[in-house]
Every structure is written in C-alpha cells, then in structure tokens.
Image: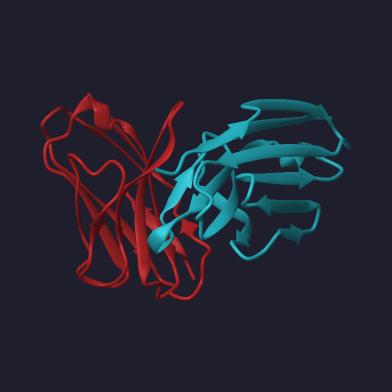
Chain colours: A cyan, B red
Amino acid sequence: KQEVTQIPAALSVPEGENLVLNCSFTDSAIYNLQWFRQDPGKGLTSLLLIQSSQREQTSGRLNASLDKSSGRSTLYIAASQPGDSATYLCAGGGSNYKLTFGKGTLLTVNP
Amino acid sequence: NAGVTQTPKFRVLKTGQSMTLLCAQDMNHEYMYWYRQDPGMGLRLIHYSVGEGTTAKGEVPDGYNVSRLKKQNFLLGLESAAPSQTSVYFCASKASGRETQYFGPGTRLLVL
C-alpha cells in the first residue's frame, strides 16, 4: 500500500526566501507524482505533474523533482511571495491514476 | 467551461438520513473520482470510475455508494449518514490519455 509523507507539516518564511517542500513515498512503482495547492476552504489546484519517466518539471518560480529510487520528490519555490501562502499537497498516482495524498505542508510567507 | 462542479456546497444531515452528492464535469473526461478530506488524515479515495457505467472501490468505500449513469456525472450516495462521515468531499476528473486530475470546489458535509 502506497504511503505518502510530507515534511515539514508547517513552514513560515519571510518574503523573498527560496524554499523546499519535501515529499516521500513508499512504493516506487508510481505512475506519476503530482503537486497541488489548496487555499483555505477551497479545492485543489494542480501545480506540477511529473510522469514516472521524468526527473523534474518547471512552471514559473516552481520546480518539482522526482527520484523514484529513493522515493522522494521536492517542490522548490523561488523568491517566495505572500500570495504563495497555502497548503501544498503531494500525491502519488497509482493504477487507474488513483492518487494517494500526503497530509500537506502549510506554508506561510510573511511580508 | 465550468470544469468540475459539485452540488451542494454545504449540507447538514442528521444521523440516519440519506443524501446524494452530485459531481458534474463538462470536459468529456473518462475518469472520475470521489475523495474525502479530514483534518490530520489528508485526502482519501472513496470510489472511482474509469468510464460511463463503471465504478470501483477506493481506500475508504464503506458507507458510500456511487453511480456513473452519464459520462459527465458521478454521484456519491450516503444511505444512512453517520457522524464519522462528517468531512469535506472532493470530486475530480481526468481525461483518458492524460494524467492530471482536476478537482471540484468541494462539498462540506456535517452529520449530527
């Protein structure tokens, strides 16, 4: 059974700082690794998806990496802004692309 | 496109009552999923469908039933609600041949 863990559970940083969110998974036979953003009381917004054959994906100030052999993914956020404050979720995709989620990292970027 | 929509947005039930949550998508997606999100537990998969007329169990299916009579709709039913089913329910859909799942805004359910 796939298990996904996210560290840290919460992170507070000053504006402008570069930061890394960590995600680990137990089953390396994942189909993909997806990072989501969730604002309070809202749904999930997909940020980046890394297919199992890929090592990283980039979108703007975000860069996500995937290392299947070690069971790890990281989400790098450059030059953080207060608008980046949200909960970040990672999820591993399995058969039929069913997602197994971590519990999330609550990010606060202070002006 | 409205994307993925969920009805209702919020509902209060008494223990033992029944209700149906509706998920609709206008993107012609084949795959649809129901998840629940609880504090400290993350999101967990309840049921999913890989196409019209098909359904399958996820990680936490007990107490729920689903139907996918039309490709664009995925219904989640609670036959006899229990306080343990108090949660936020999210629906998601995915196109065949693509991997990204798109989520609805959620339904908050409170069972007293």
Decide which of B11, A8 is in the foreground and name it.
A8
Residue A34 image point, x, y percent: 58, 53
Q: Would you say A32 lies left or right of B92 here? A: right
Q: Would you say B16 lies left or right of B29 here? A: left
Can residue B111 be seen?
A: no
Can residue B65 be seen?
A: yes
Q: Would you say A21 lies left or right of B14 here? A: right
Residue B5 image point, x, y percent: 40, 58
Q: Residue at x 55, y 58 (%)?
A: A32
Rendered image quadrant of residue B78: top left
Decide which of A104, B3 is in the foreground and name it.
A104
B38 is higher (above) or lower (below) than B70 = above
Rendered image quadrant of residue A110: top right
B96 is higher (above) or lower (below) than A29 = below
Q: Residue at x 87, y 43 (%)?
A: A79
Q: Residue at x 41, y 55 (%)?
A: A98
Quarter of the figure with the C terminus of chain A: top right
Q: Residue at x 45, y 51 (%)?
A: A99
Residue B94 image point, x, y percent: 44, 66
Quarter of the figure with the N terminus of chain A: top left
B56 is higher (above) or lower (below) than A24 = below
Tally of numbered tags = 0
Residue B38 image point, x, y percent: 40, 31
